[in-house]
Image (cartoon, rainbow, N blue to C red):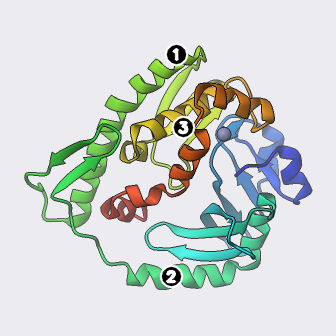
Amino acid sequence: MEASIADCKRAGLDFFNCDNKRARSTQRHCCRIRFSNDVGFDDMASDFIIDEHNNARFDYSIRVSSKARYAKLQIKPYLGLEVVIPTRFPKKAVPELIRQHAGWIEKQLRKHQQQYVKPELPGDIFLAIDDSTTQISEFRSDDYDDNILSLRQWVRKRAWEILPPMLEGLSQTCELDYQKVSIRSQKTRWGSCSSRGTISLNDQLVFVPAATAEYLMIHELCHTRHMNHSRKFWALVESHCADFRYHESVLNRARAHIPEWFQYSMSR
Ligand SMILES: [Zn+2]
């Protein structure tokens, strides 16, 4: 979710920050946006809201479409709620939009949940990031979800082997320092950077081409200098990655790169 604290306040939303006692005491308000555990800047238009009126949490992603004329809510198989907004639609208005339609969303999510068919377990796994294909010789368990879990653990292991060295190399080339790297499985977010210099990377980056994963890392490294998406920030990104707009569009469409079994595992 791309919004400043001031933006959130203007939209009538509480900014939730675990390190901030005052913010913690406001948890009971109807709706809040959570960024990360420490004050930082999360990326890509995605987040969740807690609608305490309906006692529900909604994870969602935002897709900005130049063709869309109105904001649209839709439910994607395995991935849940997607909000498609026209270019000029303010992102900060999205949580309110979701709250207004909470009842419809819950009903649709339940309906889709019942329709989900388990995807076939893969015979091999293709990682676009290093152009590698790994054969799956056998599944250890008779339980489908156990096998999915093993596959996810394998992806996480590969992510740890591949992503941190890439980040370290780019940090040195671009002369942008960070403190720590963590790897997570966020549903909709590709990466984030905290004010303490911790860069979080999504393990699904192993499914996107290396040049695009590199762009995402450069983007996060640039946040160590600018904790915002200001003009100065984008100028710094462009100085290290001239094709950043192209890679941004690849990331926006990257669900196509994520295998169905992995998407299914995220709905567990
Ligand atoms: Zn960013």
Say above or below: 155 vs 123: above
Answer with mark 1 or mark 2, whichever residue precedes in sequence.
2
Image location of residue 240, percent across then percent down: 60, 25
Q: Residue at horizontal 71%, vertical 72%? A: 98
Q: Could one spot residue 44 in this view of the protein?
A: yes
Badge 3 amino acid = Leu
Query: Label 1 belongs to which residue?
Result: 173
Q: Is mark 3 within 8 Å of ligand 1?
A: no
Q: Is residue 35 left or right of residue 13?
A: left
Per the image, label 1 sits on a secondary structure element best described as helix
Residue to which mark 2 is pinned = 110
In the rendered structure, which disc, 3 or 1, sits on the residue that comes first in sequence?
1
Query: Residue 159 at what x, y percent from top left?
Result: 35, 37
Which residue, given by chain and number where applicable, does mark 3 sit on?
A: 216
Q: Quadrant of residue 148?
A: bottom left
Give the image quarter of residue 104. bottom right
Q: Secondary structure at mark 2?
A: helix
* Tag 3 and tag 1, C-beta contact below 8 Å: no
Q: Name the residue at 8% across, 54% down.
A: 138
> On the rendered image, what quadrant is the C terminus found in?
bottom left
The alpha-carbon separation of the residues under discs 3 and 2 comes to 33 Å
Is disc 2 surrounded by few (<14), some (14 to 19) or many (20+) residues within 10 Å? few
Residue lying furthest right = 10
Out of 157 and 245, give the one closest to the viewer.
245
Label 1 vs label 2, nearer the camera = 1
Q: Earlier in the sequence, mark 3 or mark 2?
A: 2
In this rendering, the answer to whether 175 lies above or below 234 is: above
Q: Residue furthest front?
A: 242
Name the residue type under label 1: Thr
Q: In the drawing, does residue 62 fall left or right of residue 94?
A: left
